[in-house]
Structures are given as C-alpha cells and as structure tokens.
Image (cartoon, grey):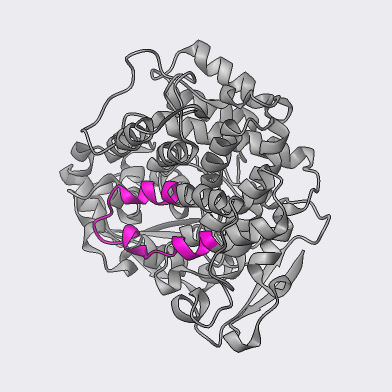
Amino acid sequence: MKLHEVRVHPSKAKLKREDQLAWKIAAVAADKVAVGREVAAMIVNRVIDNAAVAIAAINRHPVVSARDMALGHARKDGACVFGVAPGRRASPEWAAWANGTAVRELDMHDTFLAADYSHPGDNIPPILAVAQTMERSGKDLVRAIATGYEIQMDLVRAICLHAHKIDHIAHLCPAQAAGIGTLLRLPTETIYQAVQQAVHVSFTTRQSRKGEISSWKAYAPAHAGKLAIEAVDRVMRGECAPSPIYEGEDSVIAWMLDGPDAVYHVPLPEPGEAKRAILDSYTKEHSAEYQSQALIDLAFRLRERIADLEQVERIVLHTSHHTHYVIGTGANDPQKLDPKASRETLDHSIMYILAVALQDGSWHHVDSYAPRRAARADTVRLWHKIETREDPEWTRRYHATDPAELAFGGRLEVHMHDGSVIEDELAVANAHPLGARPFGRADYEHKFRVLTDGIISTREANRFLEAAAELPRLAAGDLHRLNVALPAGGLLAGKPGIF
C-alpha cells in the first residue's frame, strides 16, 4: 500500500490529473491485478450475506416502495430485482435502487469502522445490477466487487466525514463507480471522470441518522448506487465531471470537510498489488448498529450474573467516542429513549439494545424491535437506567492499527440497589474475525437460511447457495442465478406513485 497526500490546491496551480486522488482511485480500479482465492471466497460470503438480509426485509414498507419504483422501469435485458422471478427485470440503476434498499433496510450486513463508518456490502447491488445487464461473468463481478470494497474502505481509513456531519455514502458512491469501472474494463480516464461525478453528487448530511430516523437510512446507499451507475453511463458517453473534485479550492475538502488547510493521507494499493480490503471488514450476527454487536454479546454473557433485573439501580457503559456520541447518551437525542421511536432509531440506541439483550438473552431482527416489545414497562424502566460515557482507552482502541488492539465494544458496570457492582467487558463481537466465533462460510449459509425461512422455498434457498458458491466460475450471462425469488403471490405491493 502507498500513502497518497491529499490537500486543497488553488485553481491557478492547475494540479495535474495524475496527482489527483480521483485519478489514483481510477488507476487502482483499472489495474487488472488478479483476485486471490481468500478474497474471492469472502466475496461469495458477502453475496450470500446481502441476499439473506435483503430477503428478510423483502416485504418491509421501504423495500416494497423501492421495488415498485424499480418495476416501473422495466427492461427486458436489464437486471434482476430481489424477490422477483428473473424473467422480469428492471433498468440497472433502478434494480440497484431496489436491491440496495433491501440490503440496507435491516442494518444487518457487513461493516468497516476506521476514521469513518461504512457498510462496504452496499457496493454489491449496483455492481451486480450492471454486471447482469451487461452480461458479464462471475470472474468480472468478483474483480469489480474487490475494487468497490478496496476504494471505500481505503477512503474510510483516511478521511472522516461524520465529524463534519456528512453521511458516509460520500465514500460509497465513488467506490461503486470505481467498481463498475473495473467490471466494464473502462480506461483510467473514464473511471476518473466517473469517480469525480460520483463524489460531486453524493455529499449529503448525517441528519438521515439523527433525530427521528426515517426510511431514508435504508434508501441512502441505494441512492448512491443509482447515482454511481448514472455517473458511469454519462462518462462512457463522453461527458466530464467537476475537477479536481477532492483538491479543488471550491470543492468538498475545502468547504465540506477539514477546510483549505487540510491534509489527508489515503492508502491505496500499488500497481500490481492485490485488492484485499474486504478481509478487514466484518459482518453482523445481530440486526443492529455494528457498534452494538460486541455489546449485545456482552449483555448475553452478563445477564447470567444478574439474579433480578428489577434490582438494577443504574447501568453505565464505558465505551469509545463513536459509540457514546452516535448511539449512546452522548448523542443528546431524546428519540433514543422514546418507546414510540421507529425501528431505525431503536437500532441506533445502545440503551434500548442493551435493555432488550439483558432481558431476553437473544436478538431477533423483527421481534426485538416490535412496538409492543419496545413499550414494555419493565423494558422502559431498565432502558432509562442506562447511560454511556466516553473512555479514552476505548476510543484509542477503536482507532488502533494493531489488530490485536482494535476494539468496538466497551465495559459494562451494573450497579445494584444493594450497592454491589457487576461488571464485564468485551472488545469485539463473537462473529468478528478476532472474536470468539469468527464467521465462516457455514455461518453465512446458516444466517441465510434463518433469515429467509418461511419466505422462500427450501428448493430456492438450495439453488441460490449452490449458485453463489460457483460465483467465480459463472459464465457471462449467468449472473441472474444470484437473484432470489419468492413464491408466486409472496410479494406485497405498495401505494401507487408516479412511476
């Protein structure tokens, strides 16, 4: 890996394209380096993971709306839409919109945390939609997904968006565009323009993850995917983009991030170096914000030591800056303590999550968020006894570069009415690569079967898992096999709109 210095340059400096971050990203995307077996195997895992969470959410309201929008843009030779039989297809940007929303809705696919947040599995829907439309092979798709993960995660390692209240899709959209560039074997010049266009249109605020969190949280990465496909389409036709998009004196770094004096150091693979970033990402065992994964596991463990939760006086979670200020009491967000809050808000409230995990000793992607469950009087009492505090040591470990030091958990102190204190800590989730039970292929397949049980037939589940395992060897035109269809009559329809 090579660190690239990125800073703002005045227009009169006429910064060469080869010295711009967007060009360097494009050069990585255009590099024809092979994908190793370990990376290819993990890509198969994440394709399975995405399909699992998408089908589990297939009839939730935002997903139904997105699917209906997509089917309003039918295209005979287009891309498949999750839940729909592959004979009925949509224009790729709209298929990416529908599938990306389905993948994101339950907040249960993969994650990578560094200087910023990310769900790099969001790269898969738009890249797959274009691959199906353009009849690319499984090998092409694997190379493209490796690029999408690499670019997004490298940007996330170096450039913090959330400190400036910019949503994390600003790193996702250029990664999606780069991945599509790899898929279509576009030249560096073309990918460069697509990356710039993607950056320019994808800077949005974090209000989508603050206050009364709406369904836009699920739509946001799908919107990025749609924008990325449109950006690539435009530049393939010879159109250009605002430039230089990162370093320009009136562009994103100067006015939306650290300002005109900012200096970032972005790591990118050297020419000929394999793209292995996906191996540093991790999926979710539980349907909740990633920073809650280890804490759910910790609550399961700690509850065995608490004889009566009604005797709890207060609970204090000592954790990282990110956890405290994003999903903890440091957010100063009253909705995170509101029993009538939306599911999207509850899965960003570590106080609610800990209360339910301590009481139930299990976590379910539907039942744990049910309005009746959230409104239980004993749950509300426990929930409102929980507070979070930033601990500098947990913050340091959150940003550690040494894998042995890296931590996304915290320390729980349960103060009882009798004056005793029960405490425990956990650094990483059980499913994390460094956790007690790291996820492997069997776990991804089990997750798929659990989340799709009762929604699709066993035959369809078996067919999909066999196709996914063959992904690196699928022939051109066979990528429709990666779609998952519900039985006839299994899909709900939503309210009519314009399309």
Q: Which one is nearer the viewer's eye here, 447 or 163?
A: 163
Furthest residue to the right? 272
Q: Left or right? Give the position of 20 relative to 35.
A: left
Q: Is residue 50 in view from this perspective?
A: yes
Prevailing SS of the magenta stretch: helix
Q: Left or right? Give the position of 378 relative to 364.
A: left
Q: Which one is nearer the viewer's eye here, 119 or 377?
A: 119
In the rendered structure, which segment of residues is drawn in magenta? 197-223
The residue positioned 31% from the left and 38% from the top of the image is 368
Q: Which one is nearer the viewer's eye here, 290 or 244?
A: 244
- The percent position of residue 28, horizontal first and vertical second, equals 73, 57
Q: Is residue 494 above or below residue 314?
A: above
Q: Left or right? Give the position of 365 relative to 10.
A: left
Q: Is residue 401 in view from this perspective?
A: no
The residue positioned 47% from the left and 45% from the top of the image is 297
* Quarter of the figure with residue 399: bottom right
Magenta stretch contains residue 79:
no
Q: Left or right? Give the position of 297 relative to 418.
A: right
Q: Is residue 476 above or below residue 26?
A: above
* Quarter of the figure with residue 134: top right
Query: How many numbered discs sit on the rendered protein?
Result: 0
- The percent position of residue 321, horizontal first and vertical second, equals 45, 70
- The percent position of residue 388, horizontal first and vertical second, equals 36, 65
The residue positioned 35% from the left and 55% from the top of the image is 350
Magenta stretch contains residue 222:
yes
Quarter the N terminus occupies: bottom right
Furthest residue to the front? 238
Q: Is residue 482 above or below residue 379?
A: above
Quarter the C terminus occupies: top left
- The percent position of residue 459, horizontal first and vertical second, equals 52, 11
